[in-house]
Image: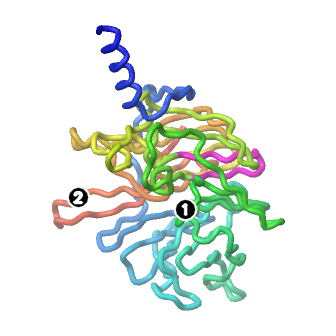
Amino acid sequence: MKKVLYIIFCLFIFSCTSVDDDFDFVDLSKSVTLQSPETILRFDDKYPVSVKVKDSLFFVIYVKADTCVDVYNIETKRKIKSLGPVGHGADDLINPNFILSADNDRVLLDEENLKKIVEIAKDDVGNMRLKEYIPYPDSIFMSSETNLSENYIAGRKVDGISGKMFYVYNRNTGKILETKCPFTLSEPIADYNYTFAPIVALNEQQKRIIVGMYFFDLVHVYDLEGKHISTFKFSERCIPDVNKNTRRLTLENGYSGFIRCFPTEKYCYLLRMTTDPAAGKTEKMLIQTDWNGNLVHSYRFADNVSGQFYIDEPAHRLYIIRNSWDAAINEEVFEIVSFKLK
C-alpha cells in the first residue's frame, strides 16, 4: 500500500511540473540598483511607449494621441516635429514600432496595421518626413518584435497559427525560416502563439538571435539558420504550470518573463519583469548579455519603467520611460529618463 501511495505521489508531482528542464541557471543576486536618473522629458498629457536616439534627435512614439511620433532636440528638449497623424493615408500611422537593428542606425518603423516599413528621414531641404524604406514582405505580415540587418529580418508573426515562435526572413532570397519553442509543456496549450510569445534580438555579424519569453523566465540563443544553441533560466521556477481545465498558464500566482530587448554590436539588453500579485508588487530588471547569452551585467530598477528603451553604448547610457503618480495634479505622469550604466 505504501508503495502504491508513493507512486501516486510521484505521478502527482510530475504532473504539476510544466517541463523537465536542464537549462543553465543565471544568478541575478548581485544585480546593481539603478537610481537617480536624469529626467529628459516629462509628459502629463501624452502616453509615450517607445524611445530612440539618433545624433542630436530624440524620437518618441505615443499611443492615445493624434500623432504617433514626436521628434525633439535632445539638447534643448524642444519639440521640432510631429509625424504620423493617426489614419490610413500615405503619411499616416496607426500603431508604429521602432525596428531594432544592431548594424543599421536609421530610424525605421514597422507599421504592421498598414503594412508599411518606413523611415523617418530628411528630404532635400532638411525637413523630416516618412518615406518607404523597403516594401513589406508578404511572408512576414503581420509582424512584431521586428529586427533588421543587411541580409535578414527577424521577428514574430502576430497572427501566427502554425505553432512557430519566431521567424528569420532572408532579404536576398525571400525565403522564411520559422522556429518552434525549444521545449514542450507537459500539458496542451489553448493558444500557442500567445503562450510562447517572444521578444527577438538579431545580430547578423555575430550570427546570433536571442529570444526572450513574455511568460517564461528563459532566454534562448539561436544561430541564423534557426538552430537552438542554448537556453538560460533566471529563476528556479522559470516555467509556470498549466491549468488542465483552461489549458492556459497559471499566472495568477506570479511569474517572471522578458518584455523588451535592444541589440547592439557587442551585447543584447533585455527588460525582465517579475510580478508578485500576493505582495502587490512588480519588479523590473535590465539584463545585459553577450551574443552567446552569457550574463555581463544586471540591474534592478527602483522606479516603475516600461516601453521600448534605447541604449547609447558608447556613452554607457540607458534611455527608458518611467511613470508615476503625481499627487499635486492627481494624475499619472510619464518621464523619459536616462541612467548611467557600467
The quarter holding residue 273 reads top left
Percent of width and height locating residue 69: 49, 76
* Mark 2, other Cα within 10 Å: few <14 / some 14–19 / many ≥20: few
Closest to the observer, 147 or 342: 147
Residue identified by numbered label 2: 325
Span shown in magenta:
200-212
Q: Residue furthest bottom?
A: 89
Q: Residue at x 38, y 38 (%)?
A: 241
- Asked whether residue 308 is in view, the answer is yes
Q: Residues within 10 Å of mark 1 (few under 14, many from 20)?
A: few
Q: Quadrant of the N terminus?
A: top left
Q: Is residue 218 above or below residue 59?
A: above
Mark 1 residue type: Ile
Is residue 225 found left or right of 32 in the rendered image? right
Provide the secondary structure element on which disc 2 rests: strand
Image position of 320 with respect to 76: above or below? above
The residue under the point 48% across, 42% down is 286
Query: Can you tell which of label 2 and label 1 is closer to the viewer?
Result: 1
Q: Which amino acid, mark 2?
A: Trp
Identify the residue under disc 1: 161
Q: How many marks?
A: 2
Give me the residue at 58% from left, 45% from top.
181
Q: Is residue 126 magenta?
A: no
**Chief secondary structure of the magenta portion:** strand
